[in-house]
Amino acid sequence: MTTDTDTASTDGGTTPQPGINRSRKPDAGGGPRWPRAGFRGRAVAVRAAGVAGVLLLVLLPLLNISLPGVLPGPTYTPGSLQLLAMCMLMAAAALTYHLLLGVAGLLSFGHALYFGAGVYGLAIILQNLDIPLLPAMGLTLLIVVVLAHVVGSISLRVSGIPFAMVTLAFAQAGSVIVGRNPEGRTGGDEGLTLRTDNLPEFLVGVVNTPNLYWLALAVLVAVFAIVTWVQFSRAGHAAAAVRENELRVRVLGLQPYLVKLLVFVVSAVLVCIIGMVFLLLQSGAVPRAMSADLTITLLVMVVLGGVGSRWGAVIGGVFYTLLDQRLTALANSEAVKALPDVLRVPLSEPLFILGTLFVLVVLFLPGGLTGTAERLAQRRGGRRAEQSREILEEAA
């Protein structure tokens, strides 16, 4: 990844002062490559922090950590573990949307169609077919691959806003089918209860919530790894090139349509897997899993975290989900009910607070949370590099 820090704190192309180590290769500006080393150091630090974070999350169900106002109880309790598992699944879903929007530049309003297909597809198969969990998941995945290929083949014939509207139309069609409850298959507005006869015992019941938590964590790590691999693969670079200049890609002899279709199908398959784990975590399917509201939520998560950033999608997903869940608890608390109407009414509406927060981030934090953090780190690194250069010049 190329950043502004590669040249931000060089000497602007002037001749190196005496006393500076000339064995160090100059950058494009002629100065010593201090920022490049700093960038690599930050990359290593981010990877190390990610590994440490995953290890901490693995051990979390075994620890007794209380975060009042953030978690409903200590970290080993089922309620807290379920909330954390939900945060990880939503972060993974935001990552799949990052693959669409941040990598390929595809603004889709129908991403929830494949999440909902995973939720309802697995629920219906388990409800009506006497087969174990893994074959049922495999059959669901096969259906979603075909569905995503068909929808993508049609939707990607257009681009921009028309593409967004076509994907929205398909998602709305799926939502209508779920609501109509054809032949009693989808449960209508009530949703479907998960049939547990053919599920492994270690995934059933409140006592096994830690196992579902670890499953959600495994899904998040796997999705992050796959998204990273796709983004930096030849297909990912081609998708980024199509996003920037599709005409140039055509001139080079590549097929932008096939590249976008590949990214579209991969993101659909990944979010389908997340939907199936969501079904196991929630023990049922609800109509919102197929609604356009969920797609908008994923879009908000990506924007909050920072469009184009994988870590931004993760942070935005966790941040939004925690706020959504905890603000609902706050809205129903006695403290809020006792406030005057001018304060009670907005504080009792979580969506109002989340919407206000979204507007503030868009206006005052361009680049989202991670973009702001990166700019602060670059400024700090630039100041350090400048101080180092001044010290070397004084020593000379």
Image (cartoon, rainbow, N blue to C red):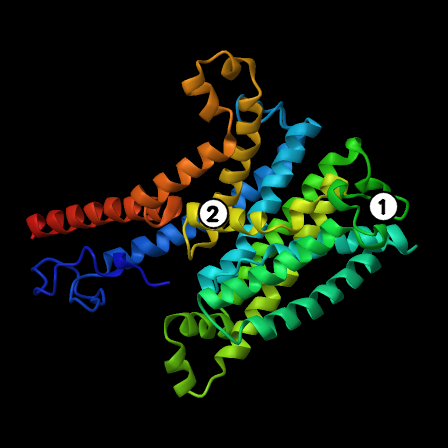
Q: Which x, y percent locates residue 38?
A: 30, 53
Q: Is residue 257 above or below residue 139?
A: below
Find out whether the residues at labels 2 and 1 contact each other: C-beta distance under 8 Å: no
Residue at 73 percent across and 62 percent down: it is: 141
Q: Is residue 359 left or right of residue 288?
A: left
> Which mark is in front, 2 or 1?
2
Question: How far across and down, in percent of the image, does residue 361 sit?
Answer: 36, 42
Q: Gap in Å between the C-alphas at discs 2 and 1?
A: 35 Å
Q: Provide residue 193's location: percent of width, then percent of height.
A: 81, 42
Give the residue number, with chain letter if any, for mark 1: 200
- Crowding at label 1, few (<14), some or many (≥20) Cα neighbours within 10 Å? few
**Amino acid type assigned to the residue bearing label 2 in the image:** Val
Q: Give the x, y percent position of residue 359.
A: 37, 41
Q: Picture quarter containing residue 209?
A: top right
The residue closer to the viewer here, 355 or 81, is 355
Q: Secondary structure at mark 2?
A: helix
* Residue that carries the numbered disc 2 in the rendered image: 300
In primary-sequence order, the first of circles 2 and 1 is: 1
Q: Name the residue nearer the viewer: 93 or 227.
A: 93
Q: In what quadrant of the picture does the N terminus appear? A: bottom left
Q: Is residue 257 visible?
A: yes
Q: Is residue 104 something one can see in this rendering?
A: no
Q: Is residue 187 above or below residue 149?
A: above
Amino acid type at circle 1 is: Pro
Residue at the image point whose x is 56% and y is 52% from the top: 295
Relative height, residue 382 to residue 324 (above, below): below
- The tag on residue 46 is none
Horizontal side, residue 132 vs residue 44: left or right:
right
Mark 1, secondary structure of its residue = loop
